[in-house]
Image (spheres, rainbow, N blue to C red):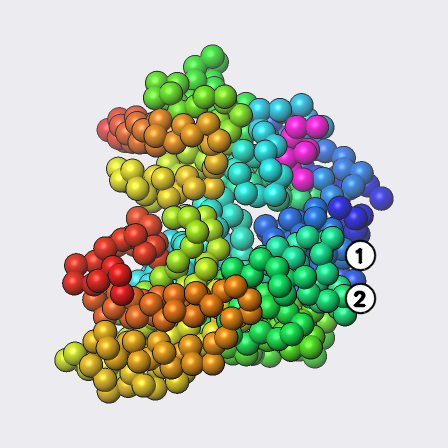
Amino acid sequence: MKRFDYVRPATIDEAVSAAAAPGSAYLAAGTNLVDLLKGGVTQPKRLVDITHLPGLDRVEDLPDGGVRIGALVRNADLAHDRNFARRFPAVAEALLSGASAQLRNAATVGGNLLQRTRCAYFYDTASACNKRSPGSGCDARGGDTRLHAILGWSESCIATHPSDFCVALAALDALVEVEGKAGRREIPLETFHRLPGDTPERESVLEPGEMVVAVRLPAAAARFAAHARYLKVRDRTSYAFAIVAAAAALRIDAGVIADARLALGGVAMKPWRAREAERLLMGARAEKANFRRAAEAALAQAKPAGNNAFKIELACRVVVRAFMLAAAGTPERMPALPASPFVTVSGVLTHA
Amino acid sequence: MGFSITLTINGVTRTIALDDPRVTLLDLLRERLDLTGTKKGCDRGQCGACTVIVDGRRINSCLALAISHDGADVLTIEGLAQGGQLHPVQEAFIAHDGLQCGFCTPGQIMSAIGLIQEGQAGADPEHVRESMSGNLCRCGAYQGITEAVLTAQRTLDAASRKEVA
């Protein structure tokens, strides 16, 4: 690990000023950043420790029925907040399907949004990587690409965004509140992360020094609470990143879909909101054939970045099954294995 | 440039001079405070051998910068036994053979204590397995570990009911 300067600001203003200097990085729990520092993957000159800033660790109900989640709220605290989990069950399920209990106890909401890809070539400093070292090339191309992108990738970068939390947030129209030198602004989570294009080193729309201070979910997101699920296929039952995941939410009126939300994880460098699929489901019956049509629409533009064509059909099946689970109803209690395909629900085919 | 932090470790408050901000909580415990019960396995947050309880929550000490935890209360495996009496989770690990080589055991035990305090698992072994997934055991003592956690949870629940009564 390269030596860095450590500063611990007392206010958000001080933090933003300190982080605006080139070579600075914010430190929250460090569950991703410290790992990257140890590997020499990132080498900031200065860490701005925001964990001691007051007032950023609260989950607040807003007068308009929405909820505001402070950037320093820990993943576990949010997932186990009963009032929150009751209103936004797919978000809680996504959180609990990520990482391990120890990591969820430490990792923050803001840090989750800004975590880096787990592409092995990004982590391996002996490999070429346009994200880590712009212009150096991409050794993932033609390499081991089983877990790489099928949507929105470019010749420069085929990595995926690893978050589960962000997938559920994208499906439910979350907003990100950020503070910078120019003041406070809001960004829809759906447009917060950038696709790689020719500049894979730029992963979000944040300007240098800008800091995530909160994430908001609108009141309308809670209207899906009765039919909202997260489903995540991974290489082991627990404590693994998604191969493909989906957040699916429905409002159903007498068997007919009044509204639908869908976002996919593990398929692109951002949580992938599938609006065309949502439109197809409006007014349709909550049935498997309709979910399959929606899934195919969601994956219509997909193409393999290498030896990962299987992820396209897998993603279709994950979408169908996530909608089948959502249609069957949000379970009263969080499943013992959150978001796992190894849990059966009566009436839902496990081989969808 | 030096830094000074205060930590309460196993009930004892100490002021610690740090000459480098890069020191993790794990390295501070093992290399500077001679508390080598907490193990360094992968050092990258993947194996759970370094699990300690900080401010009542189990975390991976290998990914925690010590300087950022200024003011924290830390419980390690050395802080569990009281006057020669093992903690109920330690006793349960012995009773159920929840170990073989023992390298992952301090992390498993601290993680189990965190899990029981979190109160999410209940009596469901599936829940326990899921909630212990951040602790790897290469000897494969998982069955004994799960049984130990369930037994310790019952013992601690019964003890707390007694206290209330």
Q: Secondary structure at mark 2?
A: loop
Give the quadrant of residue B19. Answer: top right
At 68% from the left and 52% from the top, the residue drawn is A124
- Counting from the top left corner in percent of width and height, residue A22 is at 80, 66
- Looking at numbered disc 1 in the image, what kind of residue is underneath it? Lys
- Looking at numbered disc 2 in the image, what kind of residue is underneath it? Pro
Circle 2 packing at 10 Å, graded few (<14), some (14-19), many (20+), is few
Q: Which mark is residue A214?
A: none
- Which residue sits furthest right? B1
| Residue B147 seen from this side | yes
Q: Earlier in the sequence, mark 1 or mark 2?
A: 2
Q: Which mark is residue A22?
A: 2
Magenta-colored stretch includes residue B26: yes
Badge 1 vs badge 2, beta-carbon distance below 8 Å: yes
**Residue occupied by mark 1:** A45
- Counting from the top left corner in percent of width and height, residue B38 is at 58, 29
Give the quadrant of residue A306. Answer: bottom right
Q: Secondary structure at mark 1?
A: loop
| Alpha carbon separation for disc pair 1 and 2 | 8 Å
Part of the protein shown in magenta: B24-31
At 76% from the left and 35% from the top, the residue drawn is B17
Q: Is residue B66 above or below residue A246?
A: above
